[in-house]
Amino acid sequence: MKKYFNELFEYEFWANDEIIKFILTLHNPPEKLLSVMSHIINAQILWLCRLQGKITDVKVWQLYDKYGLDKISKNTAINLNEY
């Protein structure tokens, strides 16, 4: 079962990374696009913290700029892979 979830996470991170790479090419990405991607990344962080039994101050609709999205997404992927 763990293998199945790892495959889902790998696909999700690949897809998110493709979208974030596109966002990085935009000079001024629409706020709605940043908002939705931020929400997706924040949900991953919140679920990871729940799995680990940790408390976080991340908010579901916390907004990141395009560079923050890239950094936080990659960091979350590393933490989930280690879990």
Image (tube, rainbow, N blue to C red):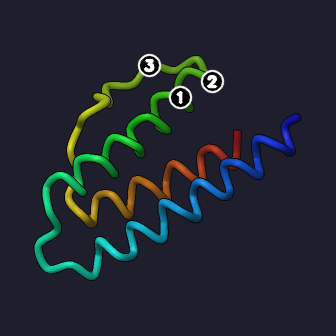
Q: Judge depth for marks 3 and 1 and give the one in front.
A: 1
Which of these two is toward me, 32 or 38? Answer: 32
Residue 14 lies in quadrant: bottom right
Answer with left or right where residue 56 lies relative to residue 6.
left
Q: Which residue is mark 1?
A: 47
Residue 24 lies in quadrant: bottom left
Residue, x 13% and y 55% (percent of image)?
A: 31
Q: Secondary structure at mark 2?
A: helix
Q: Secondary structure at mark 1?
A: helix
Disc 2 to disc 1, C-alpha distance: 6 Å
Identify the image quadrant of the C terminus.
top right
The amino acid type found where label 2 is placed reads: Leu
The amino acid type found where label 3 is placed reads: Ile
Q: Which residue is mark 3?
A: 55
Disc 2 to disc 3, C-alpha distance: 10 Å
Residue, x 63% and y 24% (percent of image)?
A: 51
Disc 3 to disc 1, C-alpha distance: 11 Å
